[in-house]
Image: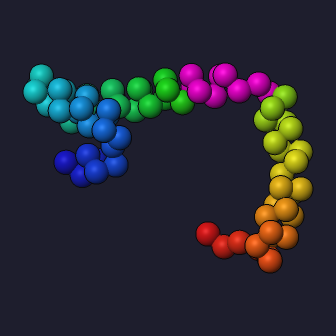
Amino acid sequence: MGLASTLYSEEQAQLDIMIQLGFSTLQMSRRITRLRCCVRNYVWDKIQPSHLESLTNSGNNRLFQVMRKFGGPSSY
């Protein structure tokens, strides 16, 4: 399966079990997508809106600090 190379080890273990249980490819894809959404929501729900606002407001300052430290803009 092409999808397997993009999975974390925990997801790969779940995929192996689903294959043994005879899940269809569509069922596996839906289940993995749903689990990823649950984890993402769990993590993001714990972040306070005030913290996100603070990060947004301080973004320019952090960028300028990085530019000063490394002598200019960074390229990714």
Is residue 26 something one can see in this rendering?
no
Residue drawn where x is 83% and y is 51% of the image: 59
Residue placed farthest to the bottom in the image?
Answer: 71
Where's residue 71, x and y in %?
80, 77
Instruction: Tell whether 21 sits left or right of 76.
Output: left
Question: With respect to residue 57, does 62 lie above or below?
Answer: below
> Relative to the observer, which residue lies in front, 58 or 6?
58
Residue 8 falls in image quadrant:
top left
The boundaries of the magenta stretch are 41-49
Residue drawn where x is 71% and y is 27% of the image: 47
Instruction: Tell whether 52 sits left or right of 75.
Output: right
Is residue 18 something one can see in this rendering?
yes
Residue drawn where x is 84% and y is 28% of the image: 50
Residue drawn where x is 84% and y is 36% of the image: 53
Question: With respect to residue 29, does 74 lie above or below?
Answer: below
On whether residue 44 falls in the magenta region, the answer is yes
> Relative to the observer, which residue lies in front, 25 or 49?
49
Q: Main secondary structure of the magenta part?
A: helix
